[in-house]
Amino acid sequence: MDDSKFNIPLSSSEASAGQWQPAQRPEYIEKIRAEARGETYRPAARKKSGPLPPDPDAVRRLFKVETGNRWMELGEREPEAKMLFGEFWHQGELCILFADTNAGKSVLAVQIANNIARAKQTGPFACDAKPEKVMYVDFELTTTQFYQRYSHPGGDHQFPNNFYRAQYNPENGANGNFKGYDDLLIAGLEYKIKQIGATVLVIDNITCLRGGTESAAVALRLMNNLKSLKADHKLSILVLAHTPKRRNPARPLSADDLHGSKLLINFADSAFAIGTSNTDAGLCYLKQIKQRNTQQIYGEDNVALCRISKTPLSKGKPGNFLHFDFEGYDAERPHILTAARHSYNRSLADHQLLATQIAALSAEGLSQRQIALRLNIALGTVNKLLRLDNNPQADDIAATVETPTESVVEDALPVSNMRAWLPGEPGARTPLGSAASRRSENEGTVTVTRANGPP
């Protein structure tokens, strides 16, 4: 059989060049050929088409490559990022503010947005930018709840004309050719940003923007969408978020306390948190968690103390604006719970003191379990601190003392009270060897005292 009739050109360019290639014969022809040879026809397995190579025109501008010196020249020409909320948040940043439920995230965010629209500093924290158009996207409060926060019988608070509040209307987003809920929200945000010309975007909060941020893939897509919004419209973005429900209050605030995937804070430019003080009801503090445009000013040794208030902002005006009053600065440690049963937040000096006491009790013949009950500490801590007393690498051993991860709110007490449990300390509540101490040891109970004030 002549096969030449089944030859076809590969393309018009190859046909013009005279290049030909045998085409695949139709299946019925293959069956006839197999029968003529007395063979059983077995159709050949079809080859799967592989991925097409990338189009060079589509990827050649994907990366911009310059020498290091050229990047330095370009960076020198860029305008300096101005402060929007002191060192916590700068222009052009995607910033995350996170805290526990009812800690005042929305109150502080509205206060910051209100002051940015006026080019006014918030408390002691500077705002170097000119008045900017701010869009506050509120997924939390209803119209009535928002009104109650900023109203007073003597007169309501007057927001600046640059302050815009957006409220989500789910019934108006039912139709549309969008892949999912998150794409719909991002498109809606982008439309309103263009409409009012906003340069600052505040989102309250990230959970409503997209659920399931525990997934790395979901978190990555969300942050990519926000960073695209920031780059396309030259925005400064503040996103509010929560802490985990079972966060351990005996630990200082850190990046690990942001609820959801770690990618959220990894892709953010800056982040800060609100912590509640254990020394005074209503007192809280602000702490820097991540920063790129500045040094850490408000870290563990210097947090900003504040309190939610509705006092008049100036004389002769009614108290119609719920806001944060700032009361100074302090270290974070006196304001958090510290567990006595476990070794949360115990300093090296406390470890060394414990090691001395443990060594003395061990020399008296007490077992490790008895020592743990006497000193109200974990058994693993006793085991490791027994090696601390005469070890030249005491710092390394103290740093490796095991710290359980479960919540210990029930047996928490302040750092200032920790030494009172040790023998020989002035004002010790339960001296070693006393009847009360022996009774607690026999009954297997631990007495705890909560903080009444900073150490």
Image (cartoon, rainbow, N blue to C red):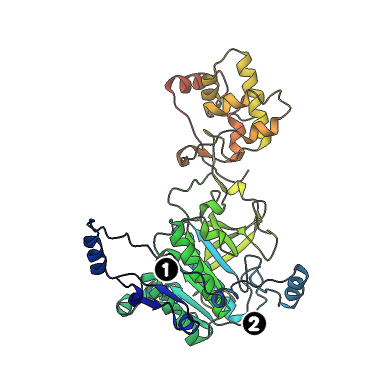
Q: In the depicted view, which residue is nearer to us: 106 or 405? A: 405
Residue 233: horizontal and vertical position, in percent? 55, 80
Q: Is residue 155 in view from this perspective?
A: no
Closer to the camera: disc 1 or disc 2? 1
Residue 83 sits above or below residue 161 on the image: above
**Which residue is under mark 2?**
130
Indicate the quadrant containing the C terminus: top left, top right, bottom left or bottom right. Answer: top right
Helix, strand or loop under label 2: loop
Could you tell me how far apart the alpha carbons at marks 1 and 2 are, in whole angstroms? 29 Å
The three-letter amino acid code for the residue at tag 2 is Lys
The three-letter amino acid code for the residue at tag 1 is Leu
- Please give the name of the residue rendered at 52% of the width and 33% of the height, measured from the top-left corner: 341
**Which residue is under mark 1?**
209
Q: In the depicted view, which residue is nearer to us: 193 or 137? A: 193
Helix, strand or loop under label 1: helix
Residue 303: horizontal and vertical position, in percent? 63, 56
